[in-house]
Amino acid sequence: MAGPRHISVSEASRPVLPRHAKLKFDETRKVWVILAPERVLAPDEIAVEVLQLCDGVRDVGAIVDALAAKYAAPRDAILADVIALLQDLADKGFLTEAREKAS
């Protein structure tokens, strides 16, 4: 059985949560969580905002552009932070890269 697919996050990556993971709002605790088999991760507010943009359609560059416009912040700083966040989540198995659909 193959291990988890390791991805290297770049500006061109199209990140998405893997099929086994779901981003949900936990009404009881009033926090966002990523639910995966036998694991739960409670990302902070900024991570949740980034994850909500990870739809497998937008690439990291588009996610960064949206955040830079929303917060009127330097794009380079946001890019570095977003790539670091997404790479950490990918390394932990909470994020993968969208694949092109075969025609």
Image (cartoon, grey):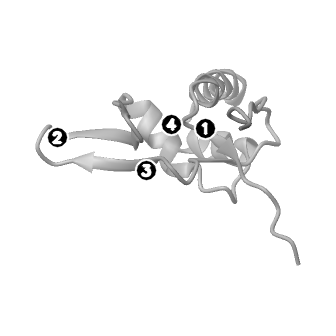
Q: Are marks 3 and 1 in contact (CB under 8 Å)?
A: no
Q: Secondary structure at mark 4?
A: helix
Vertical order, 72 against 56 (above or below): above
Amino acid bearing label 1: Ala
Q: Residue furthest bottom?
A: 103
Q: Are marks 4 and 1 in contact (CB under 8 Å)?
A: yes
Q: Kindly report the distance in space between the C-alpha atoms of the residues bearing marks 2 and 3.
A: 16 Å
The residue that disc 4 covers is 71
Q: How far from the left and from the top, in percent, is residue 82?
A: 62, 29
Residue at x 55%, y 50% (from the top left corner): 53
The disc, 3 or 4, on the residue closer to the chain's N-terminal end is: 3
Q: How far from the left and from the top, in percent, is residue 18?
A: 58, 48
Q: Kindly report the distance in space between the C-alpha atoms of the residues bearing marks 3 and 1.
A: 26 Å
The disc, 2 or 3, on the residue closer to the chain's N-terminal end is: 3
Q: Kindly report the distance in space between the C-alpha atoms of the residues bearing marks 4 and 1.
A: 5 Å
The residue that disc 3 covers is 22
The residue that disc 2 covers is 30
Vertical order, 30 against 43 (above or below): below
The residue that disc 1 covers is 68
Location of residue 63 by image quarter: top right
Q: Which quarter of the image is occupied by the C terminus?
A: bottom right
Q: Kindly report the distance in space between the C-alpha atoms of the residues bearing marks 3 and 4.
A: 26 Å
Number of residues whose C-alpha sits closer than 10 Å to that of mark 4, classed few (under 14), some (14–19) or many (20 or more): few
The disc, 4 or 2, on the residue closer to the chain's N-terminal end is: 2
Amino acid bearing label 2: Lys
